[in-house]
Image (cartoon, grey):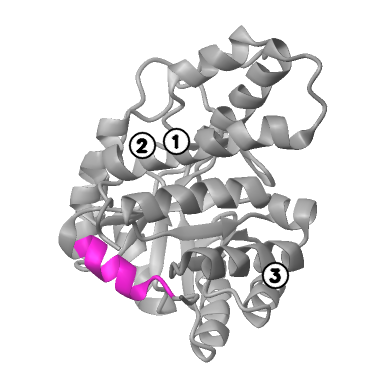
Amino acid sequence: MALVTSKEMFRKAYEGQYAVGAFNVNNMEIIQGIMKAAVAEKSPLILQVSAGARKYASPVYLKKLVEAAMEDTGWDLVLHLDHGESFEICKQCIDDGFSSVMIDGSKYSLEENIALTKQVVEYAHDRGVVVEAELGKLAGIEDDVNVSAADAMFTDPDEAAEFVEKTGVDSLAIAIGTSHGAYKFKGEAKLDFDRLEKISRLLPGFPIVLHGSSSVPEEFVALNNQYGGKIPGAKGVPEEMLLRATKYGVCKINIDTDLRLAMTASIRKVFVEQPAVFDPRQYLAPARDAIAEMVAHKMRNVLNCSGKA
């Protein structure tokens, strides 16, 4: 058991045309549910920590929970910083023992993004840590990421090739039509596969990352609303589109909103059906099982990574 980088995971994923799931974690039950599914499915795994999770649980608690998960299961995994907004935050996570970090310079000009990413890459690579960057802007809201539809911008394939060459980054998150959070698409969701195919041709063998890839299963939206939630109907990215993306170099797919919906639906159900419950274990245990069920579904049917550990 060990914290590992994503290099070997992504090499195998690229060659096998599947993706590794990167699941956002915030507390013990979420980590336990994800680990239960990964072990059962024999799947490679990335656990990632967002800025919001770092503020909520503190990096020390999250790192120790991840260490406990590895000791408990004997599973190797990647501990990844999601959407690091500055060199300082990436440096702190690298120094704290993360095996992978993301520097998100997508709000800057191409030249500024290249300079910032290169700075992080040089520091990380000297310490055996891999780096993900982002080029293009995804619409949507999730934790500290907030981009309006008007400000969203698809990734330019030629710029992507230039970016990778000049920064030495290990993987690249691109914008081809996905969106952060439980985004309501106007009409059917559409991913720009022509753009994805061109990027993958210009970057042969290079791992591409998709953020904002929640499928938003209708049954969990309905279950939340059945038990008192007021979650609007949302059309996420169809799962068959995400599975298709793995054929074009997408080696990492981020998953967060689906987990929140599954967990919250389970907790709401307990409180409605058993209003006298006040022991957290009585509503967090089924929530943990709901997380495990959702993650296993993603590994089998969306990521196609079951049995690939």
Q: How many marks?
A: 3
User: Marks 3 and 1: which is nearer the front?
Assistant: 1
Classify the position of the C terminus by image quarter.
bottom left
C-alpha distance separating marks 3 and 1: 30 Å
Q: CA distance from mark 2 to mark 1?
A: 5 Å
Residue on which the image places disc 3: 89
Is label 3 in a helix, a strand or a loop? helix
Q: Nearer the viewer, residue 52 or 163?
A: 52
Q: Residue at x 78, y 22 (%)?
A: 277
Disc 3 marks which amino acid?
A: Ile
Residue at the extreme bottom: 126
Q: Is residue 148 above or below residue 118?
A: above
Give the Cα distance between marks 2 and 3.
33 Å
Residue 89 is situated, as x and y percent measured from the top left of the image, at 70, 70
Residue sitting at x 70%, y 76%? 92
Question: Which mark, by number, is residue 297?
Answer: 2
Left or right: residue 292 versus residue 52 is left
Few, some or many residues within 10 Å of mark 1 (<14, 14–19, 20+): some
Against 173, is 271 above or below? above
Residue 246 screen position, x and y as percent: 24, 49
Q: Pointer 2 and pointer 1: residues touching (CB < 8 Å)?
A: yes
Question: Where is residue 230 shown, x and y percent of the image?
Answer: 67, 13
Which image quadrant for residue 65? bottom right
As helix, strand or loop, the secondary structure at mark 2 comes to helix
Residue named by callout 1: 294
What amino acid is found at the position of numbered circle 2 in the picture? Answer: His
From the viewer's perspective, is residue 201 above or below residue 297?
below
Q: Is residue 265 left or right of residue 51?
A: left
Say whether residue 38 is visible: yes
Q: Residues within 10 Å of mark 2 (few under 14, many from 20)?
A: some
**Residue for point 50% across, 75% down:** 3
Boundaries of the magenta span: 5-14
